[in-house]
Amino acid sequence: MLLATAAVIPAFTALKLSPILGFLLSGCVLGPNGLSLVSDVHTIEVLAEFGVVFFLFEMGARFLYDDTSWIEILVRLALS
């Protein structure tokens, strides 16, 4: 799986396509309905849920630090 991820990013970037499409394609090929290299679906679902949680956390942190006015409001509330 890691090798597929490492191969997908440069290949789809060279084709000027989003690597997300490559991840979806490699998941379809390597998954239980394709070559069946991944057979434990429940473990993959749990890992995918953790990935979504980490992604949402990262996006929230990015928006928090990009918006300086929000930080100014928090600092003023904390100091008052």
Image (cartoon, rainbow, N blue to C red):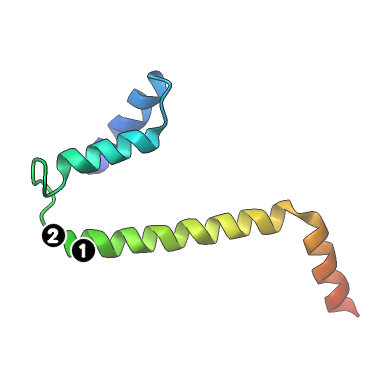
Q: Are marks 1 and 2 in contact (CB under 8 Å)?
A: yes
Q: Quadrant of residue 74?
A: bottom right
Q: As rendered, which of 33 and 13 lies closer to the eye?
A: 33
Above or below, comparing residue 35 to residue 14 in the picture:
below
Say which residue label 2 marks.
Answer: 40
Q: Residue furthest front?
A: 33
Percent x, y for residue 40? 13, 59
What residue type is disc 2 on? Asp
Identified at 35% across, 35% down, the residue is 21
Percent x, y for residue 20? 38, 38
* Crowd tier of the residue under label 2, counting other residues whose Cα lies within 10 Å: few below 14, some 14–19, many 20 or above: few
Identified at 30% across, 61% down, the residue is 47
Q: Residue furthest bottom?
A: 80
The local secondary structure at tag 1 comes to helix
Q: Residue furthest top?
A: 15
Disc 1 versus disc 2: distance between alpha carbons?
6 Å
Quick check: 35 left or right of 53?
Answer: left
What residue type is disc 1 on? Thr
Quick check: 30 left or right of 76?
Answer: left
Say which residue label 1 marks.
Answer: 43
Identified at 66% across, 55% down, the residue is 63
Q: Quadrant of residue 14?
A: top left
Quick check: 17 left or right of 23?
Answer: right
Q: Which labelled disc corresponds to residue 23? A: none
Identified at 10% across, 55% down, the residue is 39
Q: Residue furthest right?
A: 80
The local secondary structure at tag 2 comes to loop
Above or below, comparing residue 30 to residue 56 in the picture:
above
